[in-house]
Image (cartoon, coloured by chain):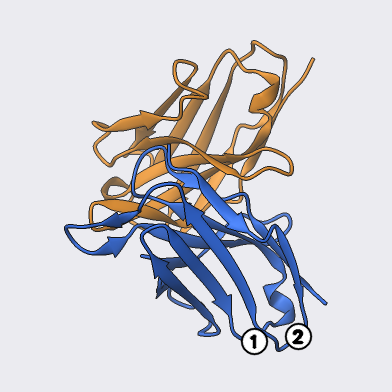
Amino acid sequence: DIVMTQSPDSLAVSLGERATINCKSSRSVLYSSNNKNYLAWYKQKPGQPPKLLMYSASTRESGVPDRFSGSGSGTDFTLTISSLQAEDVAVYYCQQYYSTPRTFGQGTKVEIK
Amino acid sequence: EVQLVESGGGLVQPGGSLRLSCVVSGFTFNTYTLNWVRQAPGKRLEWISYINSGSNAIYYADSVKGRFTISRDNAKNSLYLQMSSLRVEDTAIYYCARENIDGDYGYFDVWGRGTLVSVSS
């Protein structure tokens, strides 16, 4: 199984400041035949289901604000919130869909400082 | 509006059985792969099962293989998860999730609100 590890486990950022979440996979999730990274990011608020933010590591899902961006390739990925808003307080998960079982990171809790 | 609505959760004793349902609306059900994903209290999300549109490709996580059975009824726009030999560690919120294909594999683009399964004596 591909193990997904996020860092940090939690972070507190001031409103308007940048938040950066890292995700590392134990094996590459880059599919060589199409050069796509099979890596997604989700946001989960308390009591709610996860919501898709990003797929293919850096493609924003429709409706997701452009302050969210994804980067990285192979085994190392980053989700960046360029200017943190109050509604961004949540737990963020990365997930690989390169192989079954699909696996998730442990989550990163983002709070307001 | 695209919607997935789970039901069937509840309290069950260890060793018992439960059948979860997920009713879908707002998209062409029989063209999408669907999954079950669960989340134990305070834990990370855990994918547990996959079924493609034609029900001819089915996969399970090792943690549920042999105990859980996924199925779907395209005529009823419904996804199911038959759970048996339940264990305390199966306690979780169970989500159904639609898979959107990206190349050969897919990410989960729409999720239901989940149904809570509690396994306890």
Q: Determine whether B64 is above or below A93 in the image.
A: above
Q: Left or right: A73 with respect to A84?
A: left
Label 2 vs 1, first from the N-terminus? 2
Q: Determine whether A52 is above or below A61 in the image.
A: above
Q: Amino acid at mark 1?
A: Ser
Q: Position of residue B95 (x, y in %)?
A: 56, 44
Q: Left or right: B118 with respect to B111?
A: right
User: Chain in orange?
Assistant: B
Q: Tell me the residue that label 1 is attached to.
A: A83
Q: Determine whether A13 is above or below A21 in the image.
A: below
Residue shown at 45% from the left, 15% from the top: B66
Q: Tell me the residue that label 2 is attached to.
A: A15
Q: Position of residue A67 (x, y in %)?
A: 55, 84
The Cα atoms of the two marked residues, 2 and 1, are separated by 7 Å
Q: Left or right: A54 with respect to A83?
A: left
Numbered disc 2: secondary structure = loop
- Disc 1 crowd, CA 10 A, few/some/many (<14, 14-19, 20+): some
B66 or B20: nearer the viewer: B66
B70 or B104: nearer the viewer: B104
Q: Is residue A91 visible?
A: yes
B78 or A7: nearer the viewer: A7
Q: Colour of chain A?
A: blue
Residue shown at 45% from the left, 47% from the top: A26
Q: Position of residue A1 (x, y in %)?
A: 43, 36
Q: Position of residue B56 (x, y in %)?
A: 23, 31
Q: Amino acid at mark 2?
A: Leu
- Disc 2 crowd, CA 10 A, few/some/many (<14, 14-19, 20+): some
